[in-house]
Amino acid sequence: MILIQGKGVSKGVAKGPLYFFQRPDTTVVKQVVSDLEAEKARLAAAQAASMEQLSALAEKCREEAGDETAILFETHAMFVEDEDFVECMMDIMEGESCNAEYAVEQAGQQFAEMFAAMDDAYMQARSADIKDVARRILDNLMGVVAGGIDSDVPVILAADDLAPSETLQLDKSKILAFATQGGSGNSHTAILARTMGIPAICGAGDALKEAYSGREAYIDGETGALYLEPDDVTLGVLIEKKRKQDEMKALLETMKGKEDVTLDGRKMMLYCNIGSPEDVTSVIDNDGQGIGLFRSEFLYLAASDYPSEEEQFQAYKKVAAAMNGKRVVIRTLDIGADKQVDYFDMKKEENPAMGVRAIRICLNRPEVFRTQLRALYRASAYGKVAIMFPMITSVWEVKECKRACAKVMAELEAEGIPFNKDTEIGIMIETPSSVFVSDQLAKEVDFFSVGTNDLTQYTLACDRQANDLGKFFDPHHPAVLRALKMATDNAHKAGIWIGICGELGADISLLPTFLAIGIDELSVSPTSVLPLRAELRKSIAKTCTLEKLELN
Ligand code: PEP
Ligand code: MG
């Protein structure tokens, strides 16, 4: 048996022949050119061709792999036209009187190295994207056709590091799994594999040899292992894993259209978290019963200036209408801390997680708040919109938010613009203080949604961004669970519903605890809905206990 150990980045077991991705030769030779203008025109044509291909790929992606991956190609298109990148290519061509190919290759390398040297793991992973973009422009300059799979049977595709666009252009019916020598779990290729539900491992290094091409292999996307000629024991484990996985897939399919209810009749609303209007497709595909958290900040993060009322209205309306009467909770702007937006021109803070963020920005900048509220109320005429305020710590903040809502409603009324005056208003419970005064807050609003990501951060004094806090960042901590219980009791006393929209909501192991606490709603990523539904429908609420709260 040969075991090649990489990092599992997309779960699942697959078996098939190993096939090494054949990339056409694009060796670049530096040439001195006399007609620089002609060379610039060649580059411009290659850029235009790249833009066209990327827009077609984004479209293909939307149909095949969802929006997250489509955005990848839109980002690539931005790189193609990025001012700094283009300037760098031009400078090289002019400075060295050289051919466009050489300038593209050099600029691509410089930018890839720059990204790779950044501290942030996400930004480091963008290095692969810039290489991908440079390779595309080069292919267009050299008239090269992208590589494919020359095999009649489906294969486990191996490569040094598969560029995301290479991944997408491949014939999916021929791919059982991916294995790469390089790459990271943060890379878009890994994201793409996960979205498409194809097992994948990365970082297998030199152990993944081209000489193994054609040999039968097994891949386990959970453990990151790739086996050639597995021994009987390993084979048994892999076969059993695959059987369970197929069974699970089939079971989840049968969950579509079923009610979210326990065996003893306790209902729970299983909703979805989304980050952009395009994510609604995935909500519908996974049979989400509503949207419990629409992070509206995507509109601000993606723009280079404040998004207008009309732009926001169109985005919210699209989601509200697509959900066809199902509840859509839209959270008002939650920037600051890890989500910085240049044009807000925020002062640098020592402790941004505890600084001017989320609702604090909105209350400090009434015009920004008003624009968003007007867009939200206008959208409320097109579906069941609910408005949610993030990072609440005090009752006065909620009162001020409600005053802003009342003012906007009065304006719209006077202007004869339709809106739903009964639009639900809710708040996020994500600070310890909001838990402690949840009895008072519950009297002010229609619902609570617990942001366990921030609630864990602030309750345990653990930075949610830090990678090295390890066991100290523990969302299962009894303090977090007791906070949930306290907020739930106070919500129910006031007759309002309470949900969880932080990552903890998708933690199936805590479902009995959530049932025991009395949580009414869980808002999770779309792909977590059906597994949760399957578990919920097997549960008996009245036998669930509060053991994890360690109250005794
Ligand atoms: C949370 O804090 O749990 C939450 C859902 O909000 P975000 O992750 O966007 O801060
Ligand atoms: Mg939060």
Image (tube, rainbow, N blue to C red):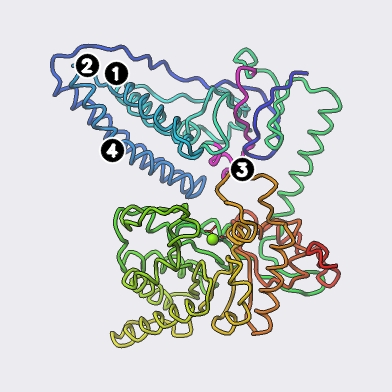
| Quarter of the figure with the N terminus | top right
- Write down which quadrant ligand 2 falls in: bottom right
Above or below 425: residue 538: above
Q: Which three-letter amino acid code belongs to the residue tagged 4?
A: Glu
The residue under label 3 is: 197
| Quarter of the figure with the C terminus | bottom right
Q: Secondary structure at mark 3?
A: loop
Q: Which three-letter amino acid code belongs to the residue tagged 3?
A: Gly
Numbered range of the magenta stretch: 190-207
* Circle nearer the N terminus (4, 1): 4
| Residue drawn where x is 86% and y is 69% of the image | 543
Q: Which three-letter amino acid code belongs to the residue tagged 1?
A: Tyr
Q: Residues within 10 Å of mark 2 (few under 14, many from 20)?
A: many
Q: Secondary structure at mark 4?
A: helix
Which quarter of the figure has residue 227?
Answer: top right
Alpha-carbon span between mark 4 and mark 2: 20 Å
The residue under label 4 is: 81
Residues at discs 2 and 1 in contact (Cβ within 8 Å) = yes
* Residue 196 on the magenta segment: yes
Q: Which mark's residue is nearer the viewer, 3 or 4?
A: 4
Alpha-carbon span between mark 2 and mark 1: 7 Å
Judge left or right: residue 246 versus residue 454.
right
- Could you tell me residue 118's position as x and y percent? 44, 34
The residue under label 2 is: 98
The residue under label 1 is: 102
Q: Residues within 10 Å of mark 1 (few under 14, many from 20)?
A: many
Q: Residue furthest front?
A: 350
* Circle nearer the N terminus (3, 4): 4
Q: Which mark's residue is nearer the viewer, 3 or 2?
A: 2
Asked whether mark 4 and ligand 1 are closer than 8 Å, the reply comes as no
Q: Secondary structure at mark 1?
A: helix
